[in-house]
Amino acid sequence: MDYIDLYELQTCFKDALEEAFPQRVWVRAEVSSVQVKSNGHCYLDLSQSEDGRVVAKAKAVIWRSRYLPVSAYFREAAGGDISAGMQILARVQVSFSELYGLTLTIDEVEPQFTLGAAELEKRRTIEKLTADGLMDRQKRLSPSLLPYRLAVISARDAAGFGDFCRHLDENPYGFRFSVTLFEATMQGVEAPASVVDAIDRIQACSETYDAVLIMRGGGSALDLACFDDYGMAFAIATCAIPVYTAIGHDRDYHVADMVAHSFVKTPTALSDLFISAFAAEDERISSYGTRLKLAFLSKLADMSSRLDMLASRIRSADPRAVLARGYTLVTDDRGVVLKSAAGLGKGSRIEVLFEDGKIEATVDGRI
């Protein structure tokens, strides 16, 4: 039986690979993991997936002498470090060791490719969400008029979450809110699944919440790329509770913002949104009180006017008021006011009343 030694087989692989790739080549791959050792070397696991299935894997290394300049350049251009989950375009030297197998030695990483790959993936996510009819689903929800019970998705020690709570508690009106934190990873490859889990926990909670708030302070484009993830966007869009987002800086606009019910730029602006809702309702109720007071005073004035008119009429009908205007009253001998000369004959006794007295008279005749 013919055979060759393992070492000889590995040597054949080595010779064939080094002959096939004598020069460095640019390789596109996804970073599965990154480890920077204490000795300064950086070790990476690279992979490629198709239709959700991994079709290729390889080990890669950036030696210490190259890692410092490569990482510094990448960080300056892309705003973050090389991390798991991102697509990279790396220049590699293919080598093969009889002991350790295939190794890709990286000496350059192109940051613009990584940024472009993230933007391309973002566009694909938007197209899929649009096709699925999910882009405006949250916006059709009717938010609570006074959102009091707030479920917040954030890292506990995040500065943005602290700013939000402080601004909410110190509002000048004295309004009080119920805030419950659902902790989640807000950066990196684990963030989408962590945020989705938090949304699921909120909806499964026995407590009923008026709003779900997803907040994270500023970061680099790569730090915040997780908020363009389809899975996270799907969970936000299909959430039965209105979702509000405050992610990144003024210039940032992520898919999570697009599918949310409402978005603002900062956690502090998010707290202002809820304070303003209560302030507007307080002003509306106060206006009702003012309108009710004005209506009541108007009614009182109308009643007072009516009373004055009635009193005036009573005073005008008083015989004394009639006499004061220069008129006289004539009564018969029984004191009955005479309104006609009929019935009076010669010798009838009458009294004529003036303001300052009366006279008694006898009728001599009637004309």
Image: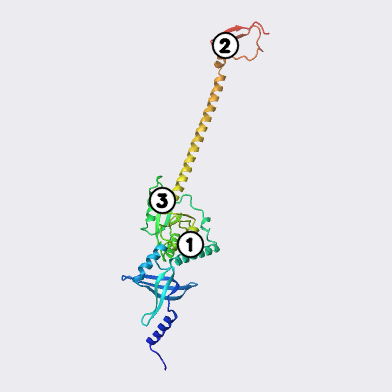
Residue 229 vertical placement versus 311 (above, below): below
Q: Circle 3 — which element?
A: loop
Residue type beneath disc 3: Phe
Q: Is residue 149 left or right of residue 316?
A: left
Quarter of the picture holding the N terminus: bottom left
Q: Amino acid at mark 2?
A: Leu
Would you name the residue on which mark 1 appears?
Answer: 233
Residue 336 in the figure: left or right of residue 239: right
Q: Position of residue 356 (x, y in %)?
A: 53, 10
254 or 28, nearer to the observer: 28
Decide which of tag 3 and tag 2 comes sooner along the chain.
Answer: 3
For the residue carrying disc 3, how many other residues have a C-alpha within 10 Å: few (<14), some (14-19), or many (20+)?
A: some
> Residue 133's spot in the image, x, y percent?
55, 61
| Quadrant hosting residue 36 | bottom left
Quadrant location of residue 74? Answer: bottom left
Question: Quick one: label 1 or label 2, which is nearer the N terminus?
Answer: 1
Q: Position of residue 340 (x, y in %)?
A: 65, 14
Q: SS for tag 1?
A: helix
The residue at 50%/37% (across/down) is: 292
Q: Tell me, for residue 353, which label it has, or none.
A: 2
Q: Residue at x 55, y 16 (%)?
A: 321
Q: Quadrant of residue 93?
A: bottom left
Answer yes or no: do the residues labelled 3 and 1 have beta carbons within 8 Å?
no
The amino acid pointed to by label 1 is Ala
Q: Farthest residue in the front direction? A: 23
- Label 2 Cα neighbours within 10 Å, binned few <14 / some 14-19 / many ≥20: some
Mark in the foreground, 1 or 2: 1
Residue 168 or residue 240, whichever sits in front: 168
Q: Residue at x 57, y 8 (%)?
A: 359
Which label lies toward us, 3 or 2? 3
Which residue is the site of mark 3? 177
